[in-house]
Image (spheres, rainbow, N blue to C red):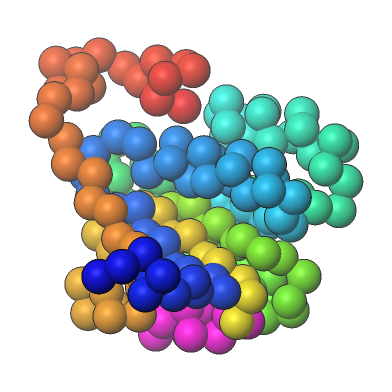
Amino acid sequence: MAFEDYKIKKSVVIVYTGEGKGKTSAAVGLMVRALGADWRVAFFQFIKHWQVSEHDFIEKIQPLYEDKLLFHKGGKGFYNAGEISEKNVSEAEHKQAANNTYHVALNAVTNGKYDLVICDEINNAVQDGLLSKKQLKDLIVSRTANTSLCLTGRDFPEELLDNVDIATHMSKIKHHFDDKFLANKGIDF
């Protein structure tokens, strides 16, 4: 096939999933690339409520991009994750936070204002039952023709793969957490 036979899509749906490290890092890299292309970007956080390095970075650059960068941190922390789960947050509070963030993200993919919408760890929210697979599919199919969408987190529903354009599965080969080492600031968060 010759190069001139290829077509260009107005927008794409990208998924970063799997047990390996790098899903959020890839999404932040995508955000940087989009902003460099003078795109308008909305970045939604569905799980992490604590201040992590990517949040610090986004908050520092927001004034530079004014209305071209929206950051919304809507998570309530780890849910149903054993001893690292948030202790003082009820299931109802987790669900409400996920649904509130979902509705803001849904507005962002449908209002035509953003060229790229990133929903970081939305797959985790679906896997944990905080959001439904139907909501995830609705988010994908409701986006405007010019809005690209990036979905991150473990366990992207396989039955929705036909609705995405690019899917990358991050596979862990080795991670120091397995040897009882905590996450490193600047590397893992």
Residue 141: in magenta span: yes
Residue range highlighted in magenta: 132-144
The location of residue 23, given as percent across then percent down, is 37, 43
| Residue 123 relative to residue 61: left or right | left
Q: Nearer the viewer, residue 19 or 40?
A: 40
The location of residue 108, given as percent across then percent down, is 69, 70
Look at the image and tell me whether residue 125 can be seen.
no
Q: Is residue 39 above or below residue 99?
A: above
Q: Is residue 124 above or below residue 184?
A: below
| Residue 59 relative to residue 155: left or right | right
Q: In which quarter of the image is the N terminus?
A: bottom left
Q: In this view, does 79 lie above or below 116?
A: above
Residue ID at (28%, 53%): 168
Q: Quadrant of residue 52?
A: top right
Residue 4: in magenta span: no
| Residue 183 relative to residue 157: left or right | right
Q: Nearer the viewer, residue 55 or 34?
A: 34
Residue ID at (62%, 61%): 116
Residue ID at (19%, 23%): 175
Look at the image and tell me whether residue 105 can be seen.
yes
Q: Is residue 134 above or below residue 168?
A: below
